[in-house]
Image (cartoon, rainbow, N blue to C red):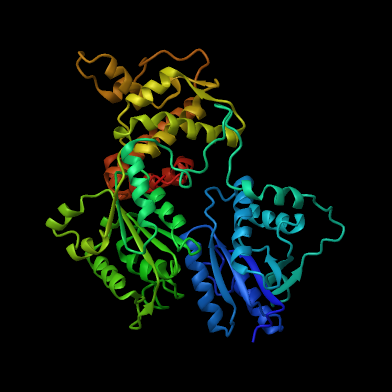
Amino acid sequence: MVDMQNIRSLVSFVGMRDPYPENDEEPGPLLSLLVDAERNGRAFDEAWLLCTGSTFHERARDLGREAREEGILTRFISLDFPVSDVIDYSEIWRLLGEAVTAIRAQAGQLPRDWSVLLDSGTPQMKSSLFLAARSGLFPATLLQGIPPRFAGGTYKVREVKLEGLPSLSLAGEVHEKKATYGTRTPSPTTGTAAPDSAYQTPIGNSIAFAEALRQAGSAARYDEPVLVLGETGTGKTLLARRIHKASQRSGGPFIEVNCSAIAESLAESELFGSEKGAYTGADKPRAGKFRAAHGGILFLDEVGDLSLEVQAKLLKSLEDRTVTPVGSDSPVDVDVRLVAATNRNLPAMIQEGRFRRDLYERLKVVVLKLPPLRERREDIRPLADHFLGDWNAIYGERRFLTEESLKLLESYSWPGNVRELANAIKSAANTSKSEALGPESLPDEIRSSGRRDARPTASAPDAGAEAFGPGAESLPEAGINLKARLLQVEWDYVSAALRQTGGNREAAARLLGMTGHAFRKALRERLAAFADEGWEEGM
């Protein structure tokens, strides 16, 4: 029986080595620590696990299963840690403050002995945990694991001794500013507070967008499935996260799955989990995204890309509230609310036999429609200011858009919607050598669109030749960053090909006259900074 006067509680990030590293039988940091603590009579009663995405929520579930198989009775609590940049100290520290508040609220008033493991996560995450403990934001014993290869063949844990280290005086400041976590510093462009991250604070005043937000707020109160419709880049993920944050499941995980990015052969194990040996390469069991979302929300983006076979299994899971892992005959209970999204015409797909009508009826209990950016042009200026304010806050700059640039942005058709606008602002800030972002700093397709609009009676020239050919326009006096501009042009074509093919990289490569290998190499190397933004994810 747990000694309620002395609850032993562990806090840690979940990393790529938990519970096991890929293709390795040696337990990762968290599982090793739990096993060591159990063997030495210092078992933890509970473990609070900070998960930076759906992959890590699933790893947290796998960790719980492996711990139970070892006879460990620790209670596991997974918490969302939605960091967009895992090496950004300021964002990690802000979110850590929010996580500490959430942990204290859920933990209640019972006395606890807190410990923090500094092994999992990026160096910036570990450093922030160290700082939280050392500063008094979250007083805890700091633990550092020593892998078996460095400890005589047995995993060992040692306490980090703080004697001799300088003390920090952040505790008072942190407690005084606790209510301001999640706010931004004033925007250098406007002098007002810059908006919060895009999914936390939607930007826009258009009637259609405001109505979608209102309906999302209403849907959040209940537990029925939601279907979000909208073009790529309109903010479907934003809406799904809003529903999660405003719902009674906000304390549970938010698990996002991009169905278009899952190989068809792996879709079932990705969603429903698998047993060891269920297929070639399944050397360990995995929980799957459904079980990772237990107690929270499962967001299936581009649900129309699932195969008919997986659709049938998805329907059964929704109706029975169970999942059956690949390679198993035993269903497992799950408590999950489903939010699905697509940019496809599902009724047309039903007529073509590519989507199940019964699943469609099950999903569309609540339907939310997000308007494309071209239908909410009054939101372009505030969105542009938001993205440029974010840029200035991150890089300490004072860039601003000229009126001519703003008019060009308002006149462009935005096939990539809000995401394309965000990337256009980043491109302009990257390439301009001046604080004033004039039309010459905007991506070529936006400028060429403006030139075509200015000559309505002229015969339409070849867009590619006009935008990118020699002598297309005079260079600005300050010059341009040619390398950055060419990378932006390449990314514009690559992202357009990905959108056109629904994320099929082989098909996108063929559209661009490239081999699949060359296309993947470009995404991995030259275009990594753009691809990391996630062309397929909502704003």
* Residue farthest along the bottom direction in this orientation: 1
Q: Is residue 238 left or right of residue 22?
A: left
| Image height of 487 relative to 180, above or below | above
Looking at the picture, how far across and down is residue 270, in whole percent? 38, 66
Q: Is residue 103 visible?
A: yes
Query: Would you identify the image quadrant in which residue 255 lies?
Result: bottom left
Q: Residue at x 31, y 53 (%)?
A: 341
* Image mark count: 0
Image location of residue 179, percent across then percent down: 63, 49
Where residue 499 appears, x then y in whole percent? 31, 43
Q: Is residue 405 above or below residue 232?
A: above
Toward the right, the furthest residue is 164
- Pick whichever, 115 or 477, lies toward us: 115
- 340 in relation to 179, above or below: below
Q: Residue at x 69, y 77 (%)?
A: 154
In this view, the residue in front, 437 or 319, is 319
Residue 218: image x %, image y %? 36, 54
Q: Nearer the viewer, residue 193 or 446?
A: 193
Classify residue 200 as left or right of residue 34.
left
Q: Residue at x 30, y 35 (%)?
A: 415
The part of the image, by quadrant, that contains residue 445 is top left
Q: Is residue 352 visible?
A: no
